[in-house]
Amino acid sequence: MAGKLKDKVAIVTGAASGIGKAIALAFADEGADIAVIDLQVEKGQGVVKSIKDKGRKAIFIKANVSESQEVAMMITEVVRQLGGIDIMVNNAAVIRQASLLDTTDELWDSILKNNLRSVFLCSRESARVMIKQGRGGNIINISSIHAILSEPQAGAYTAAKGGIEAFSRTIATELAPHKIRANYIRPGATYTELTIPMYTEPVKKAIYTRVPMKEIAQPEWIASAVVFLASDDSRYMTGEGLTIDGGYIMDGSLPGAEYWK
């Protein structure tokens, strides 16, 4: 089988671990060549090796995607080494908890810079290349269910994720004439290297009570949806989001209440 993304060139930020790593590997399985972008050099190079073992081209670039000069360098290197850009996945993000009253100016600016400004910079620079190439493209942004659900102690994070969704819709309109689509993914609770320590037994019990499907996602489940958005299977979809959360957002039932007997 040729693969849904045969010979496409994809950039995945935050691809050294977690959801980003799963996306990069899933893209490779579908025939794409990948630029793995991260600040974690050893882990990032490990992902590159895994992609090459699948028979695809891959490069690692260490870049802080919230800095415009580093993003420009990254884009230049991807075009030079892989020949162009077809897919831009903005996945890199951080979360630092603080209440509204304890959130400093510096903390707010840091999270918005890492989680939202980076999406703007990478989208702008990759879109410029895609327009010049004249063959369309895809921008896929990783949001969160907490773009629309509150997450106490994480106001800056939720603001950034909400901003990603509004930004995605706007650039989808602007880029549509160039056959460049922009969509986003809203993951729910997902096991990653960073979140596994958070999922203690009491936390998992609470999630299973609240989430109808009573599971925590694996990164590969999120990656499958990103493959869909990156492929021609979603060719008539832009400015939209896919929520992958086991029913968390849609469920309005009261935990513990008996609705069926």
Image: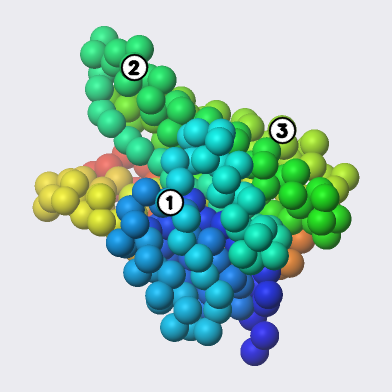
| Crowd class of label 2 (few under 14; some 14 to 19; many from 20; radius 10 Å) | few
- In this figure, which residue is indicated by the disc labeled 3? 170
In this rendering, position of residue 116 left or right of residue 235: left
**Label of residue 106 in the image:** 2
The percent position of residue 72, horizontal first and vertical second, equals 60, 42
In this rendering, position of residue 145 left or right of residue 100: right
Q: Secondary structure at mark 1?
A: strand
- 105 and 186: which is toward the camera: 105
Q: Secondary structure at mark 2?
A: helix
Q: Name the amino acid type tagged 2.
A: Glu
Q: Tell me where residue 176 sits by quadrant.
A: top right
The structure residue drawn at horizontal position 43% and vertical position 33%, both measured from the top left corner, is: 114
- Give the answer, above or below, for where 189 lies relative to 144: below
| Crowd class of label 1 (few under 14; some 14 to 19; many from 20; radius 10 Å) | some
- In this figure, which residue is indicated by the disc labeled 1? 62
In the rendered view, how is the structure colored? rainbow
